[in-house]
Amino acid sequence: MFAFLSTITWWGWILIILFLVAIRDIFLQKAHTISHNYPIVGHFRYILEKIGPELRQYLVANNREELPFNRIERGWIYASAKKENNYEGFGTDRDIYAHQHIFINNAMMPFKPSENHPNEIDKTFLPCAKVMGLHNKRKKPFRPASVINVSAMSFGSLSAKAVESLNKGVKMADAYHNAGEGGLSPYHSYGGDVVFHFGTGYFGVRNEDGTFSLDKLVKLVEENPFIRAIEVKLSQGAKPGKGGVLPASKITKEIAEIRHVELGKDVISPPNHSAFSNVPEMVDFIEKIAEATGLPVGIKAAIGKLEQWEELANIMQKTGKGPDFITVDGGEGGTGAAPPSFADHVSLPWVYGFSDLYKLFQRKGLTERIVFIGSGKLGFPAKAAMAFSMGADCINVAREAMMSIGCIQAQVCHTNRCPSGVATQSKWLQGGIDPTLKSARLAQYFKTFRKEFIEITHAAGYEHPCQFKMSDIEINVDDHNLSKELDKTYRYEKTPVPFNNMQDLKDCIYLGGNK
């Protein structure tokens, strides 16, 4: 038998294998009609379908065509993170007459920093113009030292090395790291400022029955002084109003210990909070956490109906209580996996949701006491200028931060097969991430972003982005390619943000959680 087999040539073996595949396709498998009707050849259809996104990304789509981030946007992030040339020559290749194109109105005379100006000393110095928790007299107010920060992405969704890279990077960039709803892991503990975030699953601060534990939260804050603020997630852009499932197969011993969940069991995050069921109870919940921890407390949500938001504004107006900051997530969807019916259609895009919410709080005279954080594809200087002109005080970035540490937009985050090792628990795949290198790239992306954002701000005649007015930004709004200022487009004027100068921000005792 062995003598006979040894006489078969290599191409003979190929023919035998193909024959066996054909037998299997025709007589044994019943699931796929194509491979049954077209044995062997039919498999190429499934192969091409599987690698179709990659083929389109690299061979078919043009530079401005892809979604959610096109090649030019990704290229700018990669080049900025690597401190490479991120310029483009021979003029823009963008259709500047296209719908939603942004124009920033530059001043005849740009702002000129003095010789000893903080931005002459550090061209990337750009802190938030507001202080979280100052109005509500929290014990530990916090002024974010960077207007761009890492959005909520948990350990479990991201790999250990990715989270480590992000935390080390924000420390180098003087930014903060939102921990995401997976609890506080050792990989969030490399010295960067952290905003501790939890949702309906209360991971890391939950009792055995899945309810919220204030005692565990207080202990967590006391043991980890780098936690500067607490964020309660009501909903997120990818799937507002929908809970989540963490399959038992993805729960390692380490993840189970961090999230305070059981090994071997699916973990369900319900769509609703069990700690409160209405707006007054939510306000009481926020105040209870702020009093127990001393930290600023905020909420995160994607925006849809406004009735309960108006109820919140009325309570804040009447009692002087409520969230210190509000993170508005865009319905564009983010790093969270979701059914297309949710990701595509539930909740408003960031510009619509934010403008609706801001106008509501403005009518109640509450905008000055709240730090507004924008989240939804805002990690580019021009988009950030638009956001600040509309009333945002900071922006959080998720996918842009992922790309700065190596994400290639493979769009398989939910499969545990992320080829760049960023969104997977596979030890092999995440083995390609060098946290020392990747953390430096995140920091460089943030610094490049801030430098260019400052330069745009100066070109518009201002010292700090908080001074942007809605009339400073124009946007193409209809099929006739007519542009309008944002105040005419969204029908409101931003409330001026109190601001003296950059030096005051630099000297602030609350900068970066110093106090």
Image (cartoon, grey):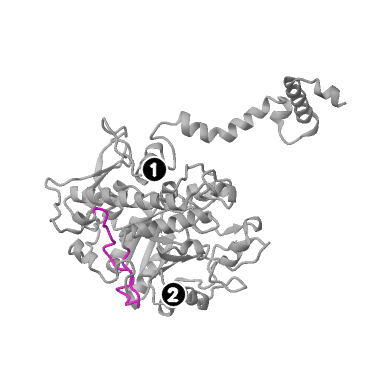
Using residue 464 as the reference point, say whether residue 95 is left or right of it.
Answer: right
According to the picture, the residue beneath numbered tag 1 turns out to be: 78
Q: Are marks 1 and 2 in contact (CB under 8 Å)?
A: no
- The C terminus, quarter of image: bottom left
* Residue drawn at x 52%, y 56% as measured from the top left: 160
413 versus 281 height, above or below: above
Q: Amino acid at mark 2?
A: Pro
Magenta stretch, main secondary structure class: loop
Q: Residue at x 41, y 38 (%)?
A: 70
- Callout 2: helix, strand or loop? helix
Q: Nearer the viewer, mark 1 or mark 2?
A: 1
* Closer to us: 433 or 175: 433
Seen at 75% across and 22% down, the residue is 15
72 in relation to 391, above or below: above
The answer to whether residue 471 is left or right of residue 3 is left
**Label disc, if present, on residue 280 of the rendered structure:** 2
Quadrant for residue 39, please give it: top right
Pick whichever of labels 1 and 2 is earlier in the sequence: 1
Drawn side of residue 208 relative to residue 125, left or right: right
Image quarter of the N terminus? top right
Q: Residue furthest toward the right? A: 1
Query: Can see residue 416?
Result: no
Residues rendered magenta in the picture:
123-144
Residue 191, relative to residue 468: is it above or below? below
The total of numbered circles placed on residues is: 2
Tell me residue 200's x, y (percent).
Answer: 53, 66
Q: In the rendering, which numbered label is found on residue 137?
A: none
- The image shows residue 363 at horizontal and vertical percentages of 28, 65
**Alpha carbon separation for disc pair 1 and 2:** 45 Å
Name the amino acid type tagged 1: Tyr
